[in-house]
Amino acid sequence: MEVGALAAEELLGAAPGESTASIRQRVVAARERATARQGSSNQALQGKAIDAQCQLDDAATKFLNTAAARLGWSGRSIHRCLKVARTIADLAGAQAVQLTHVAEAVQYRRALKSAH
């Protein structure tokens, strides 16, 4: 993920971020949510299970299809993106994968691809 440079005064004057303990609690809750819903982590989802757990509304589907076409993604790449989006939704405590979760996942996939 690309992060822009901050001036020293911006960095030093910034409010403290989320604590490690708080982040850990969200991650544990997200894993528990995924396991309760589907019996495994999101990363372990395959094939039709991805489609079943990552049902998108029309706007999210259109966004993902457009992004995949522009970026030349394969079906496998789309499934990877969906699993990341499902995890983002779980971290946010959302029942359904929404457009914002898909958009964030697309950005992560793009950042990973450009880093290689």
Image: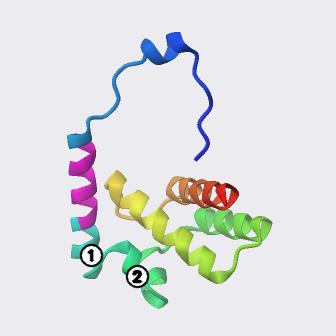
Q: Which residue is mark 1?
A: 37
Q: Judge whether residue 14 can be spotted in this image.
A: yes
Amino acid beneath label 1: Arg
The magenta stretch is 22-31
Dot 1: few (<14), some (14–19), or many (≥20) neighbours within 10 Å? Answer: few
Q: Judge whether residue 56 can be spotted in this image.
A: no
Q: Nearer the viewer, residue 77 or 82?
A: 77
Dot 2: few (<14), some (14–19), or many (≥20) neighbours within 10 Å? Answer: some
Task: Give percent across and percent down for residue 57.
Answer: 54, 67
The image quadrant that residue 115 belongs to is: bottom right
Task: Give percent across and percent down for residue 62.
Answer: 67, 67
Which element carries disc 2, helix, strand or loop?
loop
**Is 70 part of what is drawn in magenta?**
no
Please name the residue shown 40% across and 59% down the image. 89
Query: Is 74 placed above or below 90 here?
Result: below
- In 3D space, how far apart are the residues under numbered discs 2 and 1 (Cα atoms)? 12 Å
Amino acid beneath label 2: Leu
The image quadrant that residue 16 belongs to is: top left
